[in-house]
Amino acid sequence: MRPAKAVAPRPVVRPVPVDDATAGTPCPSCGTPNPPDRRFCRRCATPLTPGTAPPPLPWWRKIRPLRRRTRAGSGRATRFLVILAVVLALCAGGFLLLPAGRNLIEDTRDKLGKSKPVTPVRVEASAEVPGRPAGNATDGLSNRYWGAPGPGASVTCTFAKPFRLVAVIVTNGASTSPEDYAHEGRALRIDLEVTASDGRKTVKKLTLIDKPGPQTFPTGISDAITVRLTLDAPAGLDGDRHLALAELEFFQRS
């Protein structure tokens, strides 16, 4: 038989004598005083400086899926950008629900889109000189005109259905010819009143240049059903002359 292999004796741990006279912070577990520079109890090794509790989460971190605590730099910038994008989207949505936001969208569509002419189904004037009816102002001919006896006269154009009035082109005077233009008086300001299908009225003042030829005025008015133009600020109204308006053209968004 082979002799058994000798087993090394286990080391015996001898407790280190503790000087009870040491002054310091008592251990929260065994009550042993410890010097101020120690981090663990010299008798039972209990931590003498337990970690502080983490600070409470801000309100925005309590919302799913952001309420998870993370280490510094682990996706914090990404979550901030996501929150910022959501806030901006909510602000943009609220702005677009306001009248100013809706008008901005419609005006942008007017500028980016195309327009096409729209013809009124009825034209009526508050006053007209003989032989110069209000229908001459919308017949597509610039050598015939509507003649009004003086300022304050108006012409009302009614359309078949509501539309977005993008622009109005006014050809002032008796004709586009410079010679014929000066033969009659002209209105250098026109009060434009647009009535919508719901009865809402929008008023714009159009200031014209005293020269022959068409002049374009952007309007940007939705749901127009009737348009009334009132002549004002006369020029060249001498003797037996009257106010002349050669042509009116209306455009809608196509």
Image (tube, grey):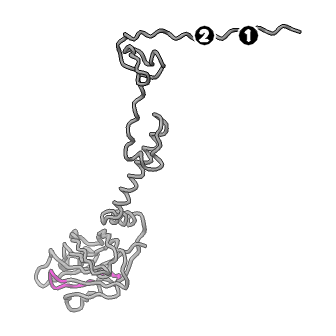
Mark earlier in primary sequence (1, 2):
1
In the picture shown, does residue 13 fall above or below 161? above
Residue 12 marker: 2
In the picture shown, does residue 1 fall above or below 236? above
Which one is in front, 53 or 102? Answer: 53
Indicate yes or no whether the magenta region holds residue 205: no
- Please rate how many residues cluster around mark 2, counting C-alpha atoms within 10 Å: few if below 14, some from 14 to 19, many from 20: few
Report whether residue 216 is seen: no
Amino acid on which disc 2 is placed: Val
Amino acid on which disc 1 is placed: Val
Which one is in front, 139 or 218? Answer: 218
At 38% from the left and 67% from the top, the residue drawn is 110
The spot of residue 29 in percent (x, y) is: 43, 24
The spot of residue 22 in percent (x, y) is: 37, 11
- Please rate how many residues cluster around mark 1, counting C-alpha atoms within 10 Å: few if below 14, some from 14 to 19, many from 20: few
For the residue labelled by badge 2, is the local secondary structure a helix, a strand or a loop?
Answer: loop
Is 179 situated left or right of 241 in this image?
A: right
Q: In which quarter of the image is residue 28?
A: top left
The spot of residue 167 in percent (x, y) is: 33, 71
The spot of residue 128 in percent (x, y) is: 20, 88
Quarter holding the N terminus? Answer: top right
Q: Quadrant of residue 136?
A: bottom left
In the picture shown, does residue 199 fall above or below 113? below
For the residue labelled by badge 1, is the local secondary structure a helix, a strand or a loop?
Answer: loop
Work out which residue is located at the far left of the displayed protein and give it. Answer: 239
So how many labels did they put on this image? 2
Residue stretch rendered in magenta on the structure:
139-153
Residue annotated with mark 1 = 7
At 36% from the left and 18% from the top, the residue drawn is 25
* Separation (CA) of disc 1 from disc 2: 15 Å
